[in-house]
Image: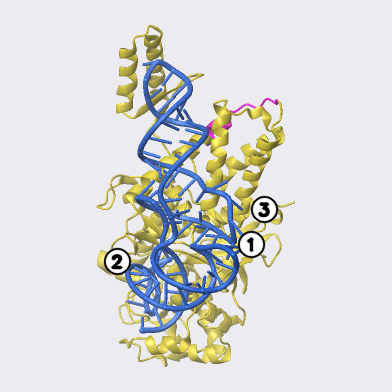
RNA sequence: GGUCGGAUGGCCGAGUGGCUAGGCACGGGUCUGCAAAACCCUUUACACCGGUUCGAAUCCGGUUCCGACCUCCA
């Protein structure tokens, strides 16, 4: 029996604004699409939070027994700088400013993106398609939309006809909760929109102006695809006309995701996605962290602490843990105090994990109450993760289990009073939830065998001093080691140490 | 201005119509030569005003404040 049958997954569906039982189209299989980055600059921490949400979703789906095809795209063309459909292409602008080939820009920031994800222990998606790799498919989709009468060509560009789509198919605005009339009355008049019949229409194919580098031949002349199109095309290609879960940041809900739905319905007549999931924003002093506000910092700055807002650096696993302590659908505010607290909590959890693996089981008089308590916590762990991926609650469960593990380790509770079955489950599930599902690993330390041996030598010297009641020397060893970041811990089985 | 969301204790953050969230910090204790770690105990809550209810921080209405989207952003 699969875990997803015992602990069925519930998802807060942005489309229906309800928490719903997750039922995949093909039993046992899940198609998951997540909007990836536009690679025109370094990723910032807010991006990391979104991708973390879906990294954990991917990990958890697999954990509870689903086979998942996880598609996360790279947008490397078509995303314009300013106003809708009239600004410069983001990649092209960067290329011009830095005097690079557009594809050099793309490669550079794609490499950076991958490096960051690796640092934070993200699992690679099954497919990572790029927009420029799917120009033909995008042209095909534009044709289908045109053939179905939901787009019009003007002067080498093709625009999606939102009003026509709405009167024929309806549903535009459903995801983001917009009312078309409000949108129309609220839209500002912008330059360069004279080609559009209505200000809400959006480009699905743009004519390349003179000097535009990233362009491809099409039935409408040289040009490039519109921003929203690549996601519709690539999700359809790899996951089908209708697939299970589409994720992304809250700020993509409108217009990006709204337009994706419209395009798919217009082209193929199918509602493209059953469950929409949106992760909330990371804030700094209560304001959204964003590139345009200039209050964002890069993952690298966070790790080195090299930023005006940071007192010091924090490890990637600390950051991962910190983010998972809140629910993905809530905003999360960033501060030094919060990070410091997270770092301590994270260490506590990893210490408990290490202790758990040192425990040796020996059956003793059983304690049914304790046994049931541990079993219940282990089940809560999955119940909470299955409840719309409530990592915050799951972590609370892990801490309660940590208390138990610590008590077993120091003899305050007798491990043998658990049934062997419970102990095995504890060891397996506690470990796998932390490492496989939450993706938390012991923070990289600069430990190596030489420092190991050196510290052990000092421990022996100190041991001798203690035997001779020469506490001045033993304390000096301990205190001076502490000053250089080595903490000694005396326990019943001798002295252990940890590096900061 | 329109739409949507939020306001929880010193800090961060879950959650819920009645029963301990959790982490960090603070205080007390056990252990220790003294520490550290670990464990136990403990203090500080649900923005404001009304209403529904036997009972609301949780539901409803209003007020204030904050945020997101409405233009590119995860």
Mark 2 and mark 3 in contact (Cβ < 8 Å)?
no
Is A403 in front, or is A277? A403
In this view, the mark in front (1 or 2): 2
Which residue lies under the disc numbered 3? Answer: A65
Q: Write down which chain is painted blue.
A: B
Position of residue A498 in the picture relative to residue A15 (left or right): left
Position of residue A459 in the picture relative to residue A147 (left or right): left
Question: In the picture, residue A447 is in which quadrant?
Answer: top left
Which residue lies under the disc numbered 2? Answer: A293
Q: Is residue A281 visible?
A: no
**In the image, which residues are magenta?**
A353-364
Number of residues whose C-alpha sits closer than 10 Å to that of mark 3, classed few (under 14), some (14–19) or many (20 or more): some
Per the model, the C-alpha gap separating discs 3 and 2 is 41 Å
Subunit that carries the residue with mark 2: A
Circle 1 SS class: strand
Q: Does label 2 lie on the same chain as label 3?
A: yes
Subunit that carries the residue with mark 1: A
């Amino acid at each position: 029996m699969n875990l997803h049958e015992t602990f069925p997954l519930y998802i807060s569906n942005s489309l229906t604004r309800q928490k719903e039982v997750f039922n995949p189209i093909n039993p046992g299989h899940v198609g998951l699409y997540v909007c990836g980055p536009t690679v025109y600059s370094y990723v910032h921490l807010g991006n990391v939070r979104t991708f973390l949400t879906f990294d954990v979703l991917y990990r958890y789906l697999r954990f509870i027994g689903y086979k998942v095809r996880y598609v996360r795209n790279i947008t490397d063309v078509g995303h314009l700088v300013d106003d809708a459909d009239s600004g410069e292409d983001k990649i092209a602008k960067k290329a011009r400013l830095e005097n690079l080939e557009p594809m050099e820009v793309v490669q550079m920031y794609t490499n950076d993106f991958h490096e960051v994800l690796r640092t934070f222990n993200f699992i690679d998606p099954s497919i990572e398609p790029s927009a420029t790799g799917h120009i033909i498919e995008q042209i095909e989709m534009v044709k289908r939309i045109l053939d179905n009468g939901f787009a019009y060509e003007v002067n080498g560009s093709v625009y999606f006809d939102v009003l026509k789509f709405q009167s024929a198919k309806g549903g535009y605005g459903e995801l983001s909760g917009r009312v078309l009339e409000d949108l129309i009355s609220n839209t500002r008049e912008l330059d360069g929109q004279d080609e559009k019949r209505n200000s809400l229409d959006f480009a699905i194919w743009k004519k390349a102006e003179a000097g535009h580098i990233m362009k491809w031949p099409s039935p409408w002349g040289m040009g490039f695809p519109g921003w929203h199109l690549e996601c519709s095309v690539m999700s359809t290609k790899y996951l089908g006309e209708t697939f299970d879960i589409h994720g992304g940041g809250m700020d993509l809900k409108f217009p990006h995701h709204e337009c994706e739905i419209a395009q798919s319905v217009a082209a193929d007549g199918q509602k493209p996605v059953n469950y929409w999931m949106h992760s909330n924003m990371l804030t700094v002093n209560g304001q959204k962290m964003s590139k345009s506000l200039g209050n964002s910092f890069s993952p690298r700055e966070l790790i080195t602490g090299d930023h005006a807002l940071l007192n010091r650096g924090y490890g990637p696993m600390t950051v991962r843990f910190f983010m998972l302590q809140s629910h993905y659908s809530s905003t999360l505010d960033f501060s030094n105090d919060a990070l410091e607290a997270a770092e301590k909590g994270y260490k506590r959890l990893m210490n408990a994990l290490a202790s758990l693996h040192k425990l040796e089981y020996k059956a003793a008089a059983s304690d049914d109450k304790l046994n049931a308590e541990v079993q219940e916590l282990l089940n809560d762990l999955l119940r909470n993760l299955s409840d719309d991926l409530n990592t915050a609650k799951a972590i609370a469960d892990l801490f309660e289990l940590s208390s138990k593990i610590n008590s077993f380790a120091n003899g305050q509770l007798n491990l043998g009073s658990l049934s062997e079955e419970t102990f095995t489950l504890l060891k397996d599930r506690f470990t796998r939830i932390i490492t496989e599902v939450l993706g938390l690993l012991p923070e990289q330390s600069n430990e190596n065998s030489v420092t190991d041996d050196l510290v052990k030598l000092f421990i022996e010297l100190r041991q001798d001093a203690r035997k001779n009641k020469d506490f001045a020397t033993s304390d000096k060893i301990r205190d001076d080691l502490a000053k250089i970041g080595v903490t000694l811990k005396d326990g019943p089985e001798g002295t252990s140490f940890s590096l900061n």
